[in-house]
Amino acid sequence: MDSGLHLVAGLDWGALPQNLILAIGLGAVYALIALGYTMVYGVLKLINFAHSEVFMLGAYTALFTSYWLGFSPEALQQASRESNWLNLLMMLLASMVFCAVVGVIIEFFAYRPMRDQPRIASLITAIGVSLLIQYGGALVLPVSPPPSINEAVNPYRGSIPVQLIAQNPALAAEAAKAKEAFDVADAAFQEQMKAERSEFDLSPRGLELRTAKQVAERNYRTVRKKAEDSGRELSIPKGQMIMFGTTVMLMAVLTWLVLKTRTGRAMRAASHDFDTASLMGISVNRIVTITFIIGSALAGAGAMMQATFIGTPLTTFYAVSLGVKAFVAAVLGGIGNIPGAVLGGMLMALAETLVVWMGKSEWKDAIAFVILIVVLLFRPGGLLGSAKVEKV
Amino acid sequence: MNWPIRIGSIVLAIVVCFGIQYLATTMLKSDGQRLVALAGLYVTLAVSLNMINGITGQFSIGHAAFYCVGAYIAGFVSLRFFQAQPLQPVLWLVVMMVLGAAAACVAGFVVGLPSLRLRGDYLAIVTLGFGEIIRIVIQNTKELGGAYALDKIPAIREIWLVWLLAIVTIAVSRNLLKTARGLAFLAVREDEVASSAMGVNVTQIKVTAFVLGSAFAGAAGALLAHYETSILPTTFSMDVSFIILTMVVLGGSGSITGSALAAVSLFYLPEYLRSQPPVSGASLAAAVIVIVAVVAVLRRIQHHYHGTVAKKVGLYIGSIVGGVVAKLILGALFGLIPAFAKASYTGDKLRMVIFAGTLIIVMLLRPQGIFAHHEFSWTLIRRLYDKVRGKGAQGAPA
Amino acid sequence: MACILAVNARACPRLLEVTNVERKRMTIWTSLAVMALGLSVLAGCKGSEGGGDTTGGATTGSTPGGDGKPTDTGGTTARKAPTGKGNTQSGDTIKIGLVASVNGELKPWGDDCVKGAQLAVDEVNAKGGIQGKKVELLIQDSASKAEQGKSAAEKLVSDGVLGIIGEVASGITLQMANTAFAAGLPIVAVGATRTDITDIGSNVFRVCYTDDFQGPVMAKFAYDELGIKNVAIMTDKAQPYSVGLSDAFRKKFEELGGKIVAEEFYQSPQDKQFGAQLAKIKEAGPEGLFLSGYFTEVGAIARQAKEQGLDVKIFGGDGWDSTELNTAGGEAIVGGFFCNHYNNEETRPEVQDFLQKWAAKFNGEKPATTMGALGYDATMLMLDALGRAKSLDSAALTAAIEETAGFKGVSGEINLTGNNGNPPKRALVVEVTATGQVFRKAYEPSDVK
């Protein structure tokens, strides 16, 4: 509290850098999914509601690949082994490839026949496909299996501490001393524990020692907190940084692909005017397929990283709300615009993180939509998009 | 329309509503009655969304938000004041409907305003976002029950009133299309620029559509609150919005008849499937393969066969019959595989899969919706009949 | 598009009329007004002619009381009697219903619950059924959603079940209990701990303890045994269970003299990253972190807390219990404490007997979650009551359940007589270890008074 960083209206400005770093990891996932939405929308003007299900399947693919690589819970119980970056890379590639295949299949069977139909019909088909994968998947996929995020599977977890402001040395020394006192009390208690039945069913002597240990521990924590508050340390989660790095890399590749290659030019042409592009000798079917391959592969990458670095139990409904948020991110940035999707994803993550930082975590999920509405009121085409008058 | 006919149809509507109530209460148990009531509410929702989406062409995918506003306002007021007020429950329910409608109107106005600037998918996402915001606000408001539920709302269950609301919604929709102003709504849907050049006040039309559509959804919400006696934020989740939208599109965007019929059938489909006996994995696998094949064949016939209408219909029927036979054979064959024969899926697990499959199949075979933009009328039926008989080749109903 | 344009072509020439024919505009509104008038007149008639029964004729769910308004509860002690008449047994079998989350996020619990219930029914049928009749268990899915739970319960009611078993989650159970109340069926909740659920009516029971018990248990355990004086709470705002449990915990913990230094919220199932909330908590410097949500998020929260260097003791409620907890939480969740209903390692004969039966029926497995035992207990309790019921109908069954005393359940002795549906039960605090959970301390209801 005496760090001098607590300035305005109870906001904890000192914690702001930490929050910004956290926003990056969240934004990376939003951005990767948003890229898929935005690409498909750019070319087909279709909200691909099934995109979040592709993401979900990507997470499952990562899971099953990890099993195949020998990291299933059963295998790990028999012989614990450490994974390396190669395994993770294989999981990433498997997810990307599988998602690309799924994306192409969905496009071929569900969206291609609808192409010259009213857009709302394609939209309903997309909703249908999304529901079909969610509920159909639930018939065959194990719901809520363990995600493969044991430390063994992914050693690149944890965080790197970075010191911004050094702790007050006097306080730090005091903390070290308190730690020693705590260790002594703890050792005494552990010694006594040998004669006890359970930590929670103690003899009077044990109880006394435990209380002493707890008092020492509380004292240590208080002092340590004071020491910590005198300085400022950032903890940079490795996983989130890897996610962010991968996202930036994939976006760079994508941008290069779209701006510099022939395929990219064809893609932009199709996005600009689908019918004219096909008249100009562009195989629009091929372009659409490529778009789906790229968009779905990106979702696969995001899914693999989400599953291995973040990890909540998987269900086939895993990505529904995530998909909606990512879509909002895409619209926020200007749908159809690649840097826009990343910007939108990052902005949304930032907004959500900052709402929590301001102590209003219950409003975290509303803020995305509030920002969206406000932005659209002033920039109807999104942040980087241009508002075009639609002609039917 | 002159007055005798008008009064006659009002009387008829009321008689029909009481007929539904009578039949439901005498023939069905409480769960069946509830489904009849909910089906009526879905008709109201679909037809009112059709006003915004189908008739005026404003792409709204957050209709459940208005439903939600109506339900919560009515539920909240009822919870507080029902005991103290002197009205009969039914009258009170009507008052609550008006209140719910008014509240939803305000919400509709608020959402309608951005529609002046936004088009297409951008508007869609704003309506969706509005729904989410409403849900989160309720979730964070203790007085509204938070995530738990707004519970113990007095039970006033009037199936006839539910259906009367549905009929009123249909009537208003229909009348809207019959008037000159109604044409202005259609004009806005077709081309905003051109209609504004023709002297249509586009702003006013759009906002009116939103306000009108949401008012009916709000009234439906009030009925829901008093029927269910316990409402929670997830009752009005995005899925509900999507399902309402699906009803509109599947029935035929812009068609009141289509919306109403699709609402009833799409609402009953999953409920019907809930209690179906389990099917074996073999039969399921066979069905999936055959359905994909039949849909492909039907699409080929639809797009590449140029014979007479009667022959085309014959081919359709032929391929469906063939499909059924193929399914039986395949099912028996698959039954020989032990893993397939052993697996069994209950209707409970399959119902949403079948629902989703239905959406896709209908859209693939009839993207303009079952009714397209047609309305039910005897003329339409006669023309269809003529068409099949090959009499009126040019008689495509407009 | 073509057809739409056709309409357009017809519409456009007439557009000029719009501004001219103002009169026509009135038609909608007049007809609407007339409709409304007719409606209100009719409503009035209905009201007066209906007399006593104004709440929709024959609908079963109408509220009690001559004036059609709900009667006042008049305090919390006496619970309202259910409004409906309930079902009576017809045919050769006795039907009871189970609602479980066979789909959705809570599937691990739903699956165990179904297995437990099936085990109980099979056991009773093998012994010759109830009063010479076989018992038939009808299962409906709630898909982990409250509205679906309501529909499922409605379906069971109309299928003629005598009583309903379920659900695990409080939000779903509330909706089912409302349905059961209106229909007059007894409902025995499996794992719904939210306190106010049994207030609905005298037909609502449960076989588990309430949040008003387990919240204080964890508060007392944390304060007395773990020596934690400053605690942070993370609540799942989308789950009624979590909100209720956090409230109960906070109340007791503050009463004991502890301090809640931070409370942060998240929403299941959409939230996967909790870094921002945890950073906020870290700033507040608590010694313990109370996670009142379900296992679906707890593991990830624990792991992310550890990654941020948040060095605190983690503990929570019975929503933690699942094998997924370990796999999702990994090393981070090890050493956490939560409140459970029973433990597979207990030596009581009921537990050992139950484990044997379970293993015999399900390929030598052990129940993965506590809901297997609770589902078994709930079903057994209802079947036990059926055996004692004076007649085979819902009202008699409700009365028999109310009279349950000294029922030897797997999760402990269950006494429902005079307890308003909430059996006083033991709570076990267990510690999460690398291989599962280990029993640490038991609390009796009297311990936290």
Image (cartoon, rainbow, N blue to C red):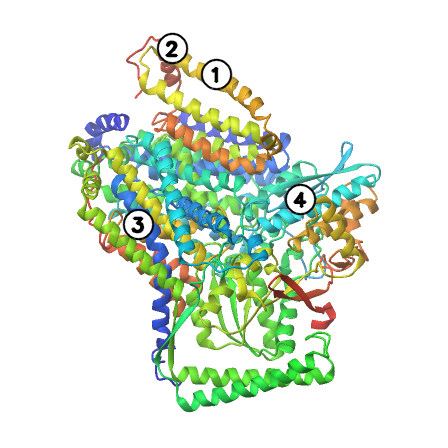
- Element under label 3? helix
Of all residues, the one furthest to the bottom in this rendering is A170
Dots 3 and 1 on the same chain: no
Q: How far apart are marks 3 and 1 (CA)?
A: 44 Å
Using the image as rendered, state which of residue B393 and residue C233 is in the foreground. Answer: C233
Q: Which residue is drawn at 66% across and 57% down?
A: C199
- Element at label 1: helix
Q: Mark 2 belongs to which amino acid?
A: Ala
Check disc 3 and report the residue beneath it. Answer: A35
Q: How far apart are marks 4 and 1 (CA)?
A: 40 Å
- The quarter of the picture where residue B240 lies is top left
x then y, percent, for residue C177: 64, 49
Residue tagged 4 = C98
Q: Quadrant of the N terminus of chain C?
A: top left
> Tag 1 or tag 2, which sits nearer the N-term?
2
Q: Same chain for the residues at labels 4 and 3, yes or no?
A: no
Residue located beneath label 1 in the image: B322
Q: Which of the chains bears the disc numbered 4? A: C
Instruction: State how far apart marks 4 and 3 are (Cα).
Output: 44 Å
Q: How far apart are marks 2 and 3 (CA)?
A: 48 Å
Q: Which amino acid does label 1 sit on?
A: Gly
